[in-house]
């Protein structure tokens, strides 16, 4: 059963995205992994192709496009070639950082920052996780305190996507230790601000091309113009934006699962030296049948989530279900494909092994799948 999510405009856009991916992504995949970094030229090329910052207002060069289906097309085309690291970087920029700016930036901040997200000149990051605070954000130790100089930011963050290349970073900090969930605020720190520096570029199991880093803030003095939104509203802002972040992760997982299945189907359809095809054997054929069915059922739910988001009706619980289900499915599809590929599926130079090591983080970031289950459980047992 084919998805009915897209119309002709989306398919025309897909052709443009595919042209970008084939010309600017495929030839660079190996080099990015070796460099542990995606070059800035690729971001600029994406900007010229109209792939970045689509939701930005037209006065800043964007398309003011609120239809999330265009973002789904981008995710699918990048997943088609196994460029998971680029997928993660683009999603962080558009689904997270730009989304926060569009929701909460004042007019002056929009003038300063939005245009670069459209052209690819500005790479953004968001700094929430800390060495001692991952899923429990209330436990963060990074603080911003006011004195005669302004806001003074101190602390460290870790596992920050685009941490090395970022031109600005949204920092989640504690501004009033006694105010509970109302004691957190968001600040935008720009590259070159005194006291802001990068720590280690982390060497990860997967997503090698995606630069992930530690960030350090040592007496970083910020003006009121660097406070994003209202003081004390940071935690509420995070809760408002989590559905989109988790939907983006779910779409990336689904797109990866579909791409991996296609690679697997092509592989088992090849004739072996004996003239037989792996897919003609009953056991591998059953694996293919089960996997394809699971993918299509999952896709139907995610299509509905995309439509709900477009109508501003995607709930945090439904986004948690999507993130949990699609990332678990991604793992199952890759595991099944690995068995059918045999030894070749385990050799890093092949894209299948790359998909395997890139996928594991999907069940961890954006809130672990254990947290997703807890969100769903609480909703089920909530008093009527």
Image: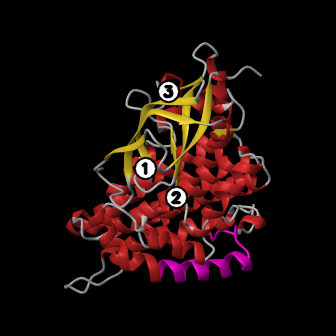
Q: Secondary structure at mark 2?
A: loop
Residue 80, visible in the rendered structure: no
Residue 43, visible in the rendered structure: yes
**First of labels 2, 1 by sequence position:** 2
Residue bearing mark 2: 123
| Mark 3 neighbour class, 10 Å CA radius: few under 14, some 14 to 19, many 20 or more | few
Residue bearing mark 1: 163
Separation of residues labelled 2 and 1 (CA atoms) = 9 Å
In the image, is residue 47 above or below residue 88? Answer: below
- Residue drawn at (40%, 68%), measured in percent from left and top? 39
Q: What is the image's colouring?
A: secondary structure
Q: Is residue 36 magenta?
A: no
- Residue drawn at (69%, 75%), measured in percent from left and top? 10
Residue bearing mark 3: 136
Q: Are marks 3 and 2 in contact (CB under 8 Å)?
A: no
| Mark 2 neighbour class, 10 Å CA radius: few under 14, some 14 to 19, many 20 or more | many
* Quadrant of the frame with the C terminus: top right
* Quadrant of the frame with the N terminus: bottom right
């Amino acid at each position: 059963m084919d998805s009915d999510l897209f119309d002709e405009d989306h398919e025309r856009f897909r052709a443009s995205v595919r042209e970008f991916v084939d010309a600017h992504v495929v030839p660079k995949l190996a080099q990015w992994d070796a460099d542990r970094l995606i070059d800035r030229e690729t971001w600029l090329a994406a900007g010229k192709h109209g792939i970045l910052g689509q939701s930005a207002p037209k006065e800043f060069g964007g398309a003011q496009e609120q239809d999330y289906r265009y973002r789904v097309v981008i995710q699918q085309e990048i997943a088609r070639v196994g460029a998971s690291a680029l997928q993660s970087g683009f999603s962080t920029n558009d689904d997270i950082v730009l989304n926060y700016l569009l929701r909460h930036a004042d007019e002056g901040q929009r003038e300063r920052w939005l245009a670069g997200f459209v052209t690819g000149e500005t790479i953004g990051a968001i700094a929430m996780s800390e060495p001692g605070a991952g899923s429990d954000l209330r436990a963060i130790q990074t603080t911003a305190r006011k004195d005669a100089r302004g806001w003074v930011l101190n602390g460290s963050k870790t596992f920050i996507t685009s941490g090395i290349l970022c031109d600005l970073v949204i920092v989640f900090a504690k501004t009033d230790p006694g105010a509970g969930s109302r004691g957190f605020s968001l600040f935008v720190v720009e590259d070159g601000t005194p006291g802001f520096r990068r720590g280690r570029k982390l060497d990860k199991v997967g997503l090698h091309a995606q630069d992930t880093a530690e960030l350090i803030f040592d007496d970083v003095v910020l003006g009121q113009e660097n406070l994003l939104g209202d003081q004390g509203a940071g935690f509420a802002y995070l809760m408002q934006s989590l559905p989109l972040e988790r939907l983006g992760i779910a779409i990336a997982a689904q797109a990866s699962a579909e791409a991996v299945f296609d690679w697997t189907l092509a592989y088992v359809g090849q004739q072996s030296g004996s003239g037989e095809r792996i897919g003609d054997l009953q056991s591998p054929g059953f694996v293919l049948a089960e996997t394809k069915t699971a993918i299509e059922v999952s896709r139907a739910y995610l299509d509905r989530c995309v439509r709900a988001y477009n109508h501003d009706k995607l709930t945090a619980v439904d986004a948690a279900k999507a993130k949990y289900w699609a990332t678990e499915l991604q793992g199952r599809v890759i595991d099944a494909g690995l068995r059918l590929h045999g030894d070749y599926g385990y050799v890093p130079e092949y894209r299948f092994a790359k998909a395997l090591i890139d996928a594991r983080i999907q069940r961890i970031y954006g809130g672990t799948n254990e947290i997703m289950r807890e969100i769903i459980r609480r909703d089920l047992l909530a008093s009527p």
